[in-house]
């Protein structure tokens, strides 16, 4: 399930000759018959891929409105299982398939993407005076080389009342959070969020506390591709028979012997520089998602167990309207399904 963005290609418009060919070893090679047409990035497929990766690594806001308290401390393990459009073309083309145990080669597409993205993380929470709390988190996406990290800050506006009229009302908290990733050169992904929730602790027999909670979360996803070679099996330098750049130190002569302008382009000795044009960057993705989340925590003395559910309130297409989210007049998130996440955690409170 690691990204393979070199497969997300849209052929040049109006050109019947493909910009690349598949070699005998199923690698992606430059097609000389299309030497004057560069491969085009499939930016809509990239945007949808980032949208679903982003939902999976986004901060879960898996907590009640009550903090750990001044001097309180919590450490726990969280497991998130996020539904994706595994049958969609962008998952099949945009991620690596299984590796052949004999040859070590990957398949040319992912014929059976996982139905869920599994995100596991270690979280540490620390309470401070005046209802503030900080959280640090590190994690990884299963079946990928992607690791995540980030932090949360929370402010409990109304917590801890046990007597009188205030004890009737639920507790209220607001917070902000951020997650980012490392482990892949294919893209950079950061998700920032704001959340608000209410909760109400329910003591049972003096030793067990069950705390149901519910809230809203707004997240913003920032996705940027790395430098992607759309014909990774063709060495552009060797194909060109490269002998330097067109510069004052390496002048290039025209057909009539004149010195051409120094434009810094590759100088080829009998080859073609066309494959240099197949190294690209996909359009940056900036999108918003609105999420409803609810769950419950059960605490017995120092041990805490929680279950949490997150779902889109608005579809990705409806939440991201306007010209900035369109390609050729069509919304780049059109047809992208709403997602949901089931999260579980187990921890200790000190």
Image: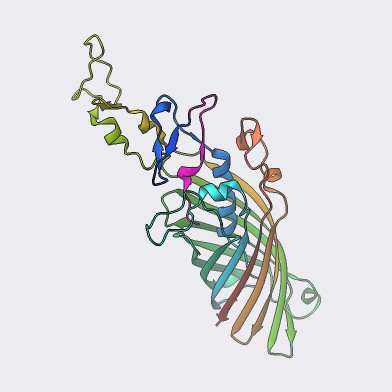
In the rendered structure, the answer to whether residue 133 lies left or right of residue 206 reads left
In the rendered structure, the answer to whether residue 290 lies left or right of residue 236 reads right
Q: Is residue 130 above or below residue 324?
A: below
127 and 31: which is toward the camera: 31
Report whether residue 50 is seen. no
Residue 350 position within the rendered picture, expressed as x and y whole percent measured from the top left:
55, 82
251 and 297: which is toward the camera: 251
Quarter of the view holding residue 209: bottom right
Residue 175 position within the rendered picture, expressed as x and y whole percent measured from the top left:
62, 61
Q: Which residues are magenta?
A: 1-17
Residue 260 position within the rendered picture, expressed as x and y whole percent measured from the top left:
26, 16
Q: Is residue 94 above or below residue 275?
A: below
237 and 322: which is toward the camera: 237
Quarter of the view holding residue 253: top left
Residue 6 magenta-drawn?
Answer: yes
Residue 113 position within the rendered picture, expressed as x and y whole percent measured from the top left:
56, 56
324 and 44: which is toward the camera: 44
Residue 165 magenta-drawn?
Answer: no
The residue furthest left is: 249
């Amino acid at each position: 399930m690691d990204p393979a963005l070199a497969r997300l290609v849209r052929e040049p418009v109006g050109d019947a000759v493909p910009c690349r060919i598949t070699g005998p070893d199923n690698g992606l090679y430059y097609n000389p018959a299309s030497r004057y047409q560069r491969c085009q990035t499939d930016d809509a497929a990239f945007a949808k891929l980032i949208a679903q990766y982003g939902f999976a690594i986004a901060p879960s806001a898996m907590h009640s409105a009550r903090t750990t308290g001044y001097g309180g401390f919590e450490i726990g393990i969280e497991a998130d299982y996020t539904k994706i459009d595994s049958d969609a073309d962008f998952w099949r083309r945009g991620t690596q398939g299984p590796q052949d145990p004999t040859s070590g080669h990957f398949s040319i597409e992912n014929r059976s993407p996982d139905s869920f993205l599994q995100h596991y993380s270690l979280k540490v929470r620390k309470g401070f005076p005046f209802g503030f709390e900080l959280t640090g988190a590190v994690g990884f996406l299963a079946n990928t080389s992607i690791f995540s990290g980030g932090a949360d800050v929370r402010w409990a506006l109304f917590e801890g009342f046990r007597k009188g009229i205030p004890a009737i009302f639920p507790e209220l908290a607001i917070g902000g959070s951020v997650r980012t990733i490392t482990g892949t050169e294919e893209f950079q992904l950061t998700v920032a969020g704001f959340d608000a929730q209410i909760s109400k602790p329910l003591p049972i027999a003096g030793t067990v506390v069950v705390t149901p909670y519910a809230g809203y979360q707004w997240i913003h996803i920032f996705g940027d591709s790395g430098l992607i070679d759309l014909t990774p099996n063709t060495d552009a330098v060797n194909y060109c028979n490269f002998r330097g750049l067109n510069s004052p130190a390496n002048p290039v002569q025209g057909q009539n012997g004149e010195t051409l302008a120094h434009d810094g382009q590759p100088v080829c000795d009998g080859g073609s520089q066309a494959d240099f044009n197949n190294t690209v960057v996909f359009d940056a993705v900036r999108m918003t998602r609105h999420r409803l989340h609810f769950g419950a925590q059960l605490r017995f003395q120092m041990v805490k167990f929680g279950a949490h559910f997150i779902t889109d309130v608005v579809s990705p297409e409806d939440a991201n309207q306007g010209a900035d989210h369109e390609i050729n007049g069509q919304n780049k998130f059109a047809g992208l399904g709403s997602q949901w996440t089931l999260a579980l955690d187990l921890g200790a409170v000190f």
